[in-house]
Amino acid sequence: MENVHERRGHRAERAAEWLDAKLLPVLGPPPLGPYGPEAPRTEAAVCPLCGSRIEEHGRQRDHGHAYLLCPYPARTQLQVE
């Protein structure tokens, strides 16, 4: 019984390789991902909540999570849906 499943697997693998060989010249290589160009990093990055520079914030790590501690009260509230 395993032989039948093995043959089907090999047949499917060969069919996929054949299809790739036929489509690659027409479509070209696949895109790397849905990612756009990386935004340039700025020295004066500001916090969206309190408006102060990120360098002024404290950092806390807890069980794989990282938290930024704002030095000033938030100007706006974070909307969570």
Image (cartoon, rainbow, N blue to C red):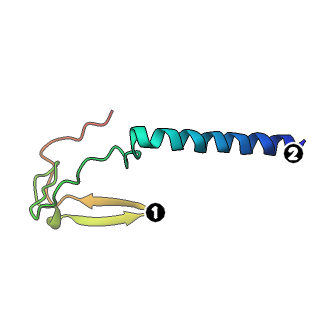
> Which residue is under mark 2?
2
Q: Position of residue 41 (x, y in %)?
A: 16, 60
The residue at the point 30 percent across, 37 percent down is 80
Q: How many neighbours does mark 2 have within 10 angstroms: few (below 14), some (14-19), or many (20 or more)?
A: few
Q: Position of residue 7 (x, y in %)?
A: 79, 43
The residue at the point 23 percent across, 54 percent down is 38
| Element marked by disc 1 | loop
Q: Pick the residue in front: 41 or 2.
A: 2
Q: Pick the residue in front: 46 or 26.
A: 26
Q: Residue 57 sits in which quadrant? A: bottom left
Mark 2 or mark 1, which is nearer to you? 2
The residue at the point 26 percent across, 47 percent down is 36
Q: What residue type is labelled 2?
A: Glu
CB under 8 Å between callouts 2 and 1?
Answer: no
Q: Where is residue 60 in the image (x, y as percent from the top left)?
A: 32, 65
Q: Which of the numbered marks, if any, corresponds to residue 63?
A: 1
Q: Quadrant of the C terminus?
A: top left
Q: Is residue 59 left or right of residue 48?
A: right
Q: Quadrant of the N terminus?
A: top right
Q: Which amino acid does label 1 sit on?
A: His
The residue at the point 23 percent across, 41 percent down is 78
> Height in image: 57 above or below 32?
below
Q: Position of residue 11 (x, y in %)?
A: 72, 41
> Height in image: 32 above or below 8?
below
How far is disc 2 from disc 1 in space, using C-alphas?
A: 45 Å
Q: Which of the numbered marks, if any, corresponds to residue 45?
A: none
Q: Residue 26 sits in which quadrant? A: top left
Q: Residue furthest right?
A: 1
